[in-house]
Image (tube, rainbow, N blue to C red):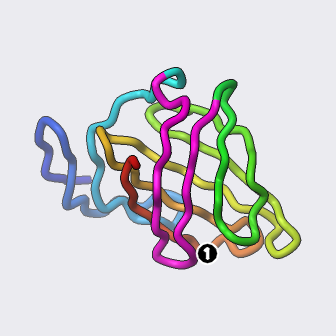
Amino acid sequence: MTANVSKDTWSDFTKVAANEKQIINLEKTVVPNPDALVNSIWKVKYTIGEEATIKFKADNKLEYNEPNYPKERTYLISGAGIIFSSSTLHFIGMKAYYIIQNNSIKGFAIFEDRPNIYSSCTGTKQ
């Protein structure tokens, strides 16, 4: 494996594949502080799908406002990322993974009934 490595990013990976997904780049992140997330609101736009608004609440709960998905759910902080999942009548399930850097958020969602389809997103703190 080779990559360009700097203090804050690793990029231009070659000969690296994990679970049939290729790593393109990595960025420095920090572990989110759940207390600092409470009452913060984030707007994200997916490459496939709708815009969504995420509002973090106390006790590792969040409100996720996107059509066709349940509004409130529990999230988990894992490493430097935030993970939550959801099931609906339309989809067997969706798992979303996010990282927060300053006032921006990046992530992606994987649809469990269609594991080869995923949608990335970017967003900002409101």
Q: Is residue 66 left or right of residue 88?
A: left
Residue 38 among magenta residues: yes
Q: How many neighbours does mark 1 have within 10 angstroms: few (below 14), some (14-19), or many (20 or more)?
A: few
Residue 95 placed where, x, y %? 66, 56
98 in relation to 16, above or below? above
Give the camera-side residue of 5 and 9.
Answer: 9
- At x 75%, y 71%, the residue is 68
Regarding mark 1 in the picture, which secondary structure is present there?
strand
Farthest right residue?
89
- The magenta stretch is 36-57
Residue under pointer 1: 116
- At x 81%, y 60%, the residue is 87
Give the camera-side residue of 28 and 106.
Answer: 106
Amino acid type at mark 1 = Asn
Residue 52: image quadrant is: bottom right
Residue 96 among magenta residues: no
Give the camera-side residue of 22 and 90.
Answer: 90
